[in-house]
Image: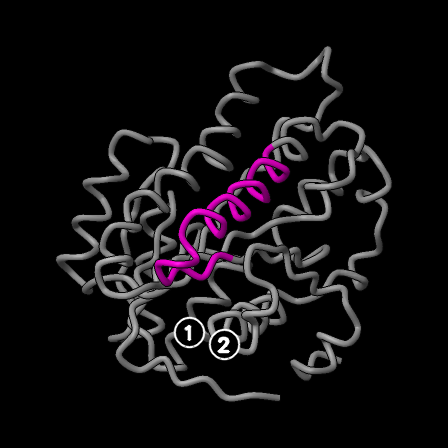
Amino acid sequence: MFDTDLSGKTVVITGASRGIGAATARLFAQSGAKTALIARSGPAIEALAEEIGANAHAFPFDLANIAQIGPLFAQITSTVGAVDVLINNAALIAPIAAMAEADLAQWDHLMRVNVTSVFATTQAYLPQMIERGGGTVINISSGAAKDAYEGWSAYCASKAAVAMLTQSLDLEYRAQGIRALGLSPGTVATQMQRDIRASGINPVSQIDWNDHIPPEWVARALLWMTTEAADVHLGQDVRLRDPALRQRLGLQ
């Protein structure tokens, strides 16, 4: 077990209205951080911010709108302050389809959200992080970054790209104080897993619901990754399936 005090820190979380993002917002706010919560659903993200209280601020926004990410982050900075931790969590799974049958517009939309927005949000905050002596960027990765799954050409390709963005960020900016890490959480009990199950495609859709880990476990791992204890993993994907890590985090 461990305790982390994030008082005085500002954390930005994308895809924060439910699942991993919402659990992370709650835990980080409980740990003292000011949180900026980004999600497409205005009512959902505003309700979550109201639930959390003074340490949470809602910013309804569709990350597919790449051109407006810079202005959005300027607004966040003016509202909650310069960022210390950026968690790129937002992601889509659709289209789930064989490559010959996948809708190209939907495939392209996924890439904008899963990949280009990760680059754009990171790029938007890098200058101020570097100016202030550093910061942490955590990208949510997946086992799909390394292994192909039937019907998931878009998702697998996007997560492979995100893993490479994590490595590239570490290579280029570690010396300037940027901590870049990825987290591969395994299968998590979220709406995405419900959508995967409904598709009936590939073995992941057949996993028993009780075998998925709760989003709170992922939030716990993300909190730990903001600490120096995780520095051995800089530039890499941390695997939450690792039994030793789960034991260290008290996730049993």
Quadrant housing residue 216: bottom right
- In terms of image quadrants, where is residue 153? top right
157 is within the stretch colored magenta:
no
Question: For the residue marked with disc 2, what is the amino acid?
Answer: Glu
State left or right for residue 86 relative to residue 103.
left
Question: If you read the primary sequence from the N terminus, does the residue marked by circle 1 or circle 2 appear first?
Answer: 1
Q: Which residue is label 1 attached to?
A: 28
> What's the CA distance linking mark 1 and mark 2?
16 Å
- Which residue occupies the foreground of this view, 97 or 170? 170
Image coordinates of residue 99 in percent, x first then y, are 72, 16
Locate residue 159: give its quadrant: top right
- Residue 100, horizontal then vertical, whole percent: 73, 11
The residue that disc 2 covers is: 228
Name the spot of residue 127 as percent of width and height, x first: 25, 50
Q: Secondary structure at mark 1?
A: helix
Callout 1 amino acid? Phe
Q: Residues within 10 Å of mark 1 (few under 14, many from 20)?
A: many
Badge 2 crowding class, 10 Å Cα cut-off, few under 14, some 14 to 19, many 20 or more, is few
In the figure, is residue 32 to the left or right of 77?
right
Q: Residue at x 30, y 58 (%)?
A: 46
Q: Residue reaching furthest front?
A: 175
Give, as a single range, the part of the protein colored magenta. Answer: 158-180
Residue 68 numbered tag: none
- Identify which residue, 61 or 113, lies in the foreground: 113
Q: How many marks are shown on the rendered structure? A: 2
Single out the residue that lies furthest toward the left.
78
